[in-house]
Every structure is written in C-alpha cells, then in structure tokens.
Image (spheres, rainbow, N blue to C red):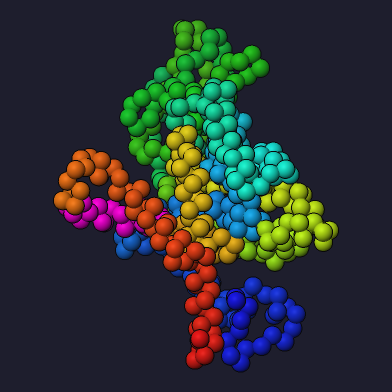
Amino acid sequence: MANIHPAGVFDTTYEEDMSVDRTARDKLWKNLAFVALLLVPMLSVSGPLGLGLISDQYVGLIARIAIFVIAVQGLNILVGYTGQISLGHAAFMAIGAYSSAILARELGFTFWTALPVSALLTGVIGLFFGLPSLRVKGFYLAMATLAAQFIIPWVLRYPLEDITGGTRPLNVPAPLIGPFGSYADDRIDDSTPLVFQAGNPYLVDVISLELTQVDGAQPVIELRNPGGDIVPGGDFNMTVLRDASGRITGFSYIATKAGEYAITAAAEADTTAFRARVRRGKVLSFATETAMYYIIVPLSVFLMFLARNIARTRTGRAFISVRDNDLAAELLGINVFGYKLRAFFLSAVYAGIAGCLLAYERNSLSLDMFRLDISIEMLAMLIIGGAGYPLGALFGVTFIRVLQEAAIPALRPRLLEILPDLFPFIEVVNITSAINPILFGGALIVFLVLEPRGIAHRWEVLKVAWKIRPYAY
C-alpha cells in the first residue's frame, strides 16, 4: 500500500521506482521530523541553551523510546519478517549491555569500539540459540528461545559474577570524545595539594599525573574529589599507570563531578625526592541524558532505515517467503535454515546495540532490567505496533511507553478513587499494585480484537486514503 502515489504522480525512472521516499514532499517531511527531534534537547531545561521550554522528562522518554525501538525493530526482523517467535529478546539485550560495560571497564575499550564488538558478540550468541529453528517452529521454538531468557541471566549472575557484579549494580563509564585542548603543565614536588576546579557537564576535565623523577621510596599519590574523599584506584573513571615492577607511576582521571579537586604526592620517607607533572585536558562527555540523546536518536533512526531496506533486498524477500510458507520457499531453492539463522543473527545484533545504549544511557546495569516480562512486553509492543511493518516498532514502543510513563500515572489517582468502591471485597493495596498490569493487558486485548494487524497497518490505510482522495473508499 505504501507504493501508491497521489493522483497525477508517476515514476519515470527506475531510481524513482526504487526510492524509499517516493516524492520530494515525503523526503521533506521526514527531514523536518528528524530535525525537530534533534532540537528537542536544545529546548529542555538542562540542554546546552537552557531555554526550559520542554521538561527533561520528555527528553529521557524519547531517548528510552528510541532505545527500545532498536530492540523491537530487531524482534520485527525475526517475528514480523521471518515468522520466527522469540521469548528471549531481553536476554540478548543483557549480553550487549554487559559485554560493552565489561569491555570498557576491564579492557579499556571506548564506547565507540565497545558498541560494534558487543553487537557482533550478541549476534553470534543469537546464532547459537537460533539452531533449534532447524527442527522446531511455532510453540516449540518459543520454548527453545525461552531457554535463553533463563540461561543467559544465570551465566551473568553466577559464573561471571566476578566481572559482572552478579546481583549488584555495575557502573558504566560515560562515552567520551577526546582529550583535546590541554592546559599548561603544573609541577609539584612536596606535599602541598594542587587544588583546582573541574567538572563541566559537557566538556569534562581529564586530570593526569605522571612521576618524572623518583629518588628513594615511592611517594604516596592521592586525588580527592569535591566531597573530600580519596578517589580509589578501582574507580571506573580512574586509570592507574604502573611500571614493569608494578609500582604506581601516575594516573589519569575523568572528573565527572563538578567541584574542587586536590592532588597530593607526598614522600613516604625523608630520603625520598621526586618530581611530578600534572596535566589537565578536556573531553567531550556524553554522561548526561541530554548528551546521550544525540547518540541514541540518530542511531535509532539509522537502524530503522536499515531495517526497512533489509525488507527490500534479496535477503528480506527470502525472510518473507519463509514466513509465508517455508515449504514453498524451500521448493523454490531458498535455504530456509540459513535464512532463519540470518534473521536470528540480525535480531540479536539489534538487541545487542539496544542493550549497549541502555547501559550507557543509565550509567548503571542490573539484571532486573532484563527480566522475562521485558521480553514479553517487547513482543506486545510489536503486536500493537504491527508485526512485519517497518514502522511497527516505532508505533508500538511509543504507545506502550507513553501509556506506562504518562497515561497510567495520570489515570491512577482517578482509578484509585473509583475502583475500591466497585470492588470492596479486594484490599486497596492489591488494587493499587494491579492497576498497571490491568491497563497494559487491557490495551493489548483491545488491539488484538479491534486492530489485530497493529497501528502501522491502520497508518498505511489512512495514508492510502489520503493519497487517493476524494475516492478514499
């Protein structure tokens, strides 16, 4: 239906016929919508301009929607395009989140290298859990993928507890670009602290200290943050430098907290003589929610565009053939098992990217963020949005997130006044805890009954009706 042109509009070249944007007006509206999205943080309270026209709450809401659009778009490739069910999508997000965090914390990867590596790792693990699709499908494949939802969190919680933290939250360093624009060096040679201000939220200071001369015992090096506490060597913002014998020769620290810092390099013994050089530079930090917005939203738009184009390729047409009739597809020469594995790989890659972005957006990880109900919720988002439609993920995620974070909180006070009178035999505490799942389940039932093909299908119908007006019947 999306290929229908308005009356009087015709394709005259193959390029026009193959174009995603069929008219100049379509391209203009999409570009304007993208620019409007990029302007949202500029108008927020904590944005670079500080205009305060939009609440920071909406900036965070759009960023979270964009993250889950990526994850659900991956699920759409598997479920909507290929017809393979999955109940372990949140577990694949956990792989992307924890692998990117571990690569950054333990191996010194930057965000820009940890993102693709964690996505590819998630895709490889997705291939492993896609192997049962050779023999089973439907309900049985759903049970096979459900195993991933239990196996992966268990592995992250117990065998890998030393590096994942197990049940404890895991801090994630912020994405950075730099350093650049360093200041002149400062030299210290006694116990007098070197005090300075640092911690701009966007151009963050990087503090480096290097011992240039040590005669005698190793001096004691301390860095105190604005709270007056000593920054430990295990802080994920701290990189400790050591020589071949393991002695500390300096450090590099990213000053994310605004305030006054103090560096001390004191002699351990009277015979110790040393000189130390301190250097301060700047890095572009994405530690704030507003800054992460400019990574998350453009990447989400790009991956949506990429997923839409996958359906137009040879691989995408093979996916759809497998979904519609896998036996007929095999008789036509399509390697059904091979394309099922490709769908699992692409779906897991999208989930890994979403998990990585979620980890860096929240700056902290917990296994509770990737429970089974999150996998079921993402499947519900796809059903409501419209499985098999390029915009299904966007419509479904937006509907559910707005329902959960805006509509339900607004309805709760009114419902708490009405429901106890309607159901006096139920305790108020139980009614309060049941409002969210009841409204969520009710919305899903309504869509399954009234619009089983999803919001995206209705959107396509409305677009066609507009294009062929006044003959919109």
Report the span colored magenta: 400-419
395 left or right of 229 in image: right
**Up-down: is 413 above or below 115?**
below
* Prevalent SS, magenta region: helix
**Residue 442 screen position, x and y as percent:** 37, 56
Name the one closer to the observer, 173 or 258: 173
Which of the 4 image quarters holds residue 327? bottom right
Q: Residue shown at 44%/27% (left/top)?
A: 168
Which of the 4 image quarters holds residue 450? bottom left
**Residue 393 screen position, x and y as percent:** 52, 59
Q: Residue shown at 61%/15% (left/top)?
A: 246
**Residue 342 screen position, x and y as percent:** 72, 50
**Residue 35 screen position, x and y as percent:** 49, 68
Q: Is residue 113 magenta?
A: no
Q: Quadrant of the N terminus?
A: bottom right
Q: Residue shown at 33%/26% (left/top)?
A: 228
356 left or right of 287 in image: right
Q: Residue shown at 40%/61% (left/top)?
A: 446
Name the one closer to the observer, 85 or 77: 85
Name the one closer to the observer, 411 or 329: 329
